[in-house]
Amino acid sequence: MVARDPGEEHRASTPLELLFDLCFVVAVAAASTQLHHGLGEGHWVAILEYAMVFFAIWWAWMNFTWFASAYDTDDVPYRLLTLLQIAGGLVLAAGVPGAFEHYDFTVVTIGYVVMRVAMVAQWLRAARQDAAGRPAAVRYAIGYTVVQVGWVLRLLLPGVAGLVGFAVLVVGELAVPAFAEARGRQTAWHPGHINERYGLFTLIVLGECVSAATVGVQSAITDRGLSADLLVTAAGGLVLLFGMWWLYFKHESTAGLRVRQSQNLIWGYGHYVVFASVAAVGAGLTIAADGETPAPVVGWTIAVSTCCYLAVSGYLHGLLRPGSVPVVSLVVVIALILAAAAAAGVLGTPATVAAFAVLVAVLLVLSIRAARRVS
């Protein structure tokens, strides 16, 4: 296990990485479903629970993705340890309902222990076989082991102490890569491969949103029949998701990741909000289709999720490609989306969702023009 060439041509995601993503989207779907049920029943605490659960999902995915970009040997030990990580991810997914309904993170933590054992074993193998990358690999193994012990001990903390412990451990997790890469040779990840991996996971989460919203529309047709309101809501939701896809993929980020490596940690971490907000939009569109949730709840769920997505994805695009994001237009569109959410009680759900779609489409046109000027 030696580091792969970060300048390697035609570096693409492997079938094993795609399997990893597809299995992890099970956990994403579980979190989105629980958010949908919680908000549909008026339990706003579901937002906090969703943020906590989604951090666990995203961070496990990110740990594997960056390691694989540098040390994908694709031999038998590597495949077996990766499959073990996938199994841990599925255990995590099984624990999502308990985390939402009973604030019980025991199963989620067990899943994380399984994934962490495999991940630390990968880093230790890299440390043993790749002399140049050994210092960073050892620091990764030590850092993740220490923090994982903290996650297990956190299960003993009650109530507010548990929340404080969660926040402290999140900071610890985010600090591990900075600690590991601080001295010596940096891990030899591949900019083009990382860009593709993030793009593929964005696509998969968007696909999960389409699937969830489609099931919601199908259930509404079965229960109440087809109506003009349902058609407007479905069409608006589809245009909204199309716009979110186009805004993310209007240009690729490989060149920026290669040139501005000091900003890559921000770019990677910022995708927590990108992924989580996309899945939350799917939850919002699902409760929009049921026709029973009050319009303000639907409006604010979709609006806040969409605005977080637009703000963070716009910032990340601008970070790697300055001038490619029309900042003033972005701020105006976000303000108008929030205004439409505030007026959802008057507009109703169909008109509110349609307004969101139109505003995102307008921003897309302005963003394409701005990107062309930079080019």
Image (cartoon, grey):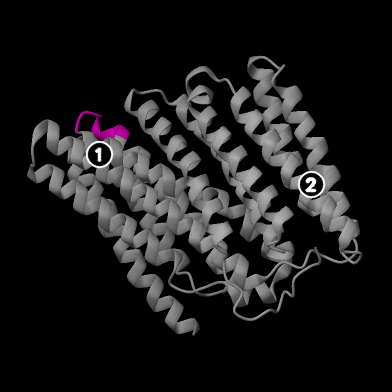
Q: Which residues are magenta?
A: 291-297
As helix, strand or loop, the secondary structure at mark 2 comes to helix
Question: Residue 235's x, y, as percent?
Answer: 20, 53
What residue is rendered at 90% in x and 67% in y? 132
Instruction: State which quadrant residue 41 falls in.
Output: top left
Could you tell me the amino acid type at mark 2? Answer: Ala
Question: Residue 167's x, y, as percent?
Answer: 68, 32
Mark 2 — residue? 121
Task: Reply above or below: 322 against 354.
Answer: below
Mark 1 — residue? 216
Q: What whole-number distance in Å separates the C-alpha atoms at marks 2 and 1? A: 42 Å
Could you tell me the amino acid type at mark 1? Answer: Gly
Instruction: State which quadrant residue 183 falls in.
Output: bottom right
In the image, is residue 45 part of the stretch drawn in magenta? Answer: no
> Can residue 179 be spotted in the picture?
no
Q: What is the number of the mark on residue 373?
A: none
The number of discs equals: 2
As helix, strand or loop, the secondary structure at mark 1 comes to helix
Between 189 and 353, which is closer to the camera in this rendering? 189
Task: Reply above or below: 79 against 93.
Answer: below
What residue is rendered at 39% in x and 75% in y? 368
> Can residue 312 be spotted in the picture?
yes
Lower position in the chain sequence, tag 2 or tag 1 = 2
What residue is rendered at 73% in x and 34% in y? 169
Mark 2, other Cα within 10 Å: few <14 / some 14–19 / many ≥20: some
